[in-house]
Image (cartoon, grey):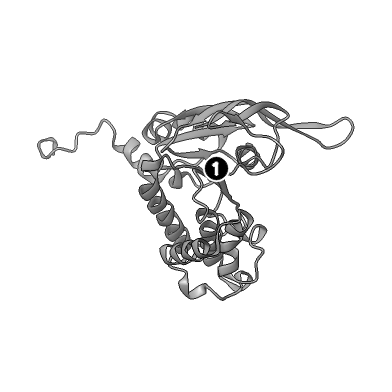
C-alpha cells in the first residue's frame, strides 16, 4: 500500500514568496489498484508524482510505502516512475543497454539479466529496436522503451506522470493498451498503477480517480461517480468530462424503449 498522510509541498521563489504546490494531501493506493490522478494545469499532479516516487521530500507530512516512510530523495525500490518526456530519463546508447541499466545497478547476475532483458523486449514488441539509439526513436517508441526499462525491475507500484502528453493519438492508444496488459498480468501479485494524466478519458479505464485542484484533493471515487455525479465540480475547476458521460447525461431520464415512440 502507498499511504499519503497530510503531504504538503512548498516552493520558495525568493526570500518572501512561497508557493504551495500540495496542501495536506491524504489518500491511499491499495495493492492491485489502478488509480488515476486528474486535475487542471498547476494543480500539483507532477509534484505528487515526485513525492510518491521519493524524488521529492514533502515540506510536511509523509509518504509510506508498504508501511515504510519514503525519505532521502531516492526512488523506493518498490516504485517505478515514468516521466512526461522520455528524453528526461533515457540515457543509454542503445535500447538494450537502457533496459538493462536498472538491473546492472542492482547487480543482477549476468545470465538472469540477459534473460529478463530479452523477455521484456519481446513483451513490449521492441526487439527490433534492441541496438538502436533511444535518441533517434519516435515519441511513442521512446515512451515504450522508458516503460520497459522500468518494468524490467518488476516494481510493485508504477507511477506515471502524464506519460502520453508527447504522444499522438495512435501512440497514446498503444501505450495505454500496454499499461492495461501490464496491470492485467501483474495485479494478482499486488501490482498497482497511479496514472497522472491531463486527459480525463484516460482515467475512465481506472478503478478509482483522485481529483486535485490547487494542490488539494477535492473529490475521489470510481469513474461513474466522478464523471457522472461530480460534473459541476469538474466544470468549476476546468477538468474535461469524457464524451461518453456527456452522452449519458443528455439521455438520462429519457425513456428509450420501443414503447415510448
Residue at left 44%, top 46%?
Answer: 201
The answer to whether residue 167 shows anywhere in this view is no
Disc 1 residue crowd, few under 14, some 14–19, many 20+, Cα 10 Å: some
Residue at left 36%, top 34%?
Answer: 224
Count the marks.
1
> Where is residue 139 drawn, in percent x and y?
56, 65
30 and 137: which one is in front? Answer: 30
Residue at left 44%, top 35%?
Answer: 31
> Where is residue 23 drawn, in percent x and y?
66, 26
Res 203 quadrant in image: top left
The answer to whether residue 236 shows anywhere in this view is yes
97 and 202: which one is in front? Answer: 97
Q: Is residue 125 above or below residue 57?
A: below
Res 107 quadrant in image: bottom right
Left or right of 224: which side holds 88?
right
Q: In this view, does 215 lie above or below 85?
A: above
- Residue that numbered label 1 is attached to: 78
Q: Circle 1 — which element? A: loop
> Where is residue 109 drawn, in percent x and y?
55, 60
Please state, as top left, top right, bottom left or bottom right, where the C terminus lies in the image. Answer: top left
Amino acid at each position: 500500500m502507498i499511504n499519503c498522510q497530510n503531504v504538503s509541498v512548498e516552493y520558495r521563489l525568493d526570500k518572501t514568496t512561497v508557493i504551495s504546490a500540495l496542501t495536506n494531501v491524504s489518500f491511499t493506493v491499495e495493492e492491485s489498484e489502478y488509480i488515476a490522478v486528474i486535475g487542471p494545469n498547476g494543480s500539483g499532479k507532477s509534484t505528487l508524482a515526485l513525492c510518491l516516487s521519493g524524488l521529492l521530500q514533502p515540506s510536511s507530512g509523509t509518504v509510506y510505502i508498504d508501511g515504510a516512510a519514503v525519505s532521502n530523495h531516492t526512488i523506493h525500490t518498490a516504485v517505478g516512475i515514468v516521466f512526461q518526456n522520455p528524453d528526461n530519463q533515457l540515457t543509454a546508447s542503445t535500447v538494450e543497454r537502457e533496459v538493462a541499466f536498472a538491473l546492472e545497478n542492482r547487480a543482477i547476475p549476468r545470465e538472469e539479466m540477459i534473460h529478463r532483458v530479452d523477455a521484456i523486449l519481446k513483451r513490449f514488441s521492441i526487439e527490433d529496436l534492441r541496438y538502436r539509439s533511444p535518441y533517434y526513436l519516435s515519441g511513442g517508441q521512446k515512451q515504450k522503451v522508458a516503460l520497459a526499462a522500468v518494468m524490467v525491475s518488476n516494481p510493485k507500484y508504477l507511477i506515471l506522470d502524464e506519460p502520453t502528453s508527447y504522444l499522438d493519438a495512435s501512440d497514446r492508444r498503444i501505450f495505454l493498451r500496454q499499461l492495461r496488459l501490464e496491470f492485467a498480468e501483474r495485479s494478482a501479485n499486488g501490482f498497482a498503477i497511479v496514472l497522472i494524466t491531463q486527459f480525463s478519458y484516460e482515467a475512465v479505464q481506472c478503478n478509482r480517480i483522485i481529483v486535485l485542484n490547487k494542490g488539494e484533493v477535492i473529490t475521489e471515487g470510481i469513474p461513474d461517480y466522478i464523471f457522472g455525479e461530480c460534473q459541476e465540480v469538474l466544470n468549476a475547476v476546468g477538468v474535461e468530462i469524457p464524451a461518453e458521460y456527456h452522452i449519458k447525461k443528455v439521455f438520462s431520464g429519457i425513456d428509450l424503449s420501443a414503447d415510448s415512440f
